Amino acid sequence: METESVWLGPLRGPVRIVAILFGAFTALVFGWLVLNQFISEEAIGMHEMIRPAGRPVVQAMLIGLAGTLLFTSVYLSDSIGAIEPKPEGFFDVLSLVTSRLAMIAVAFIVIVMFYEVVSRYVFSRPTLWANELSLWIAAFVFLLAGQYAMQQRSHIRIYVIYDIMPRWMQKLADVISVSLICAFFFALLWGGYNDAMRRMLRMETFGTAWDPPIPGTVKPAVLIIIFLVTIQAVSNLIADWNKRPDHHKGIEDIDETEIENIRRTLEEN
């Protein structure tokens, strides 16, 4: 059943088509790479996949994968769950897109670890890359999850104290908390910018057999994504400034839709 469009509107269909086309292209290139493992003496493996220079097939694979992830994330962000608030601006939409990317990345981690387990314990051929690839992906999942938590207002807040405050004091508390987030970002930028740029410009690697550029990509990603978290916090402050405050009453705040989904799942099992 087609769900209602949240923000794409008439672009929902074209984005879905582009995502499918990128996915089909990526699958074809991946199939060719797998076939080459059996018919070519110069087959491209995982070692070459992070070294695309001079390898047009690898470049095509990476472009196709990036396009698939981007347009799939955009398409999936156009529908929200029962417990997700509707996005109210550009930064809410951006956080939804990155959250869908993180969800897809979790599935990638499961696939990579499943491959490693089967390869190691069934065929006695452990890989050199599965553990590092899962760590690499998980680092981005961790960072993007923080951005999503900020957009959903699901970060830690002591409501026992917050709810008894008058509205002017709640606004003051919100301003202080957002100011602290901004101060943390500027401190992180001040202390980590030079190191992140140095690692990124030389694309520093992990120093292992597979040798992926984990430091060269994760270090700058920390600064970029924390910046997005900070912008999202400021956006939340502006969006919530004139709203009536929600009052939280513990057990009464449990989402009935979520309870019903859990009950249905238990009954099916």
Image: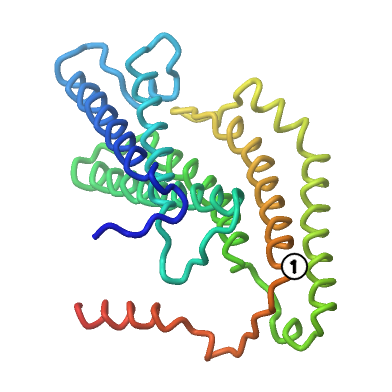
Give coordinates of residue 185: x percent, y percent.
77, 48
Work out whether residue 155 or residue 110 is closer to the camera in this orientation and state it.
155
Q: Quadrant of residue 225?
A: top right
Work out whether residue 119 or residue 165 is closer to the camera in this orientation and state it.
165
Label 1, residues with CA under 10 Å away: few <14, some 14-19, many ≥20: some
Q: Quadrant of residue 115?
A: top left
Going by the image, does 154 lie left or right of 262? right
Going by the image, does 190 lie left or right of 220? right
Give coordinates of residue 66: x percent, y percent.
42, 32
Name the residue at 65% across, 85% down: 247
Work out whether residue 44 or residue 238 is closer to the camera in this orientation and state it.
238
Name the residue at 60% across, 53% down: 89
Quarter of the C terminus within the rendering: bottom left
Q: Is residue 2 above or below residue 261?
A: above
Q: Quadrant of residue 197?
A: top right
Q: Which residue is mark 1?
A: 241
Name the residue at 39% across, 79% down: 257
User: Given the current orientation, which residue lies at the most extreme left position?
Assistant: 39
Name the residue at 71% across, 25% down: 198
Q: Secondary structure at mark 1?
A: loop
Quarter of the N terminus within the rendering: bottom left
Work out whether residue 235 or residue 136 is closer to the camera in this orientation and state it.
235
Going by the image, does 148 lie left or right of 263? right
Three-letter code for the amino acid on which mark 1 is drawn? Trp
Give coordinates of residue 42: x percent, y percent.
26, 11
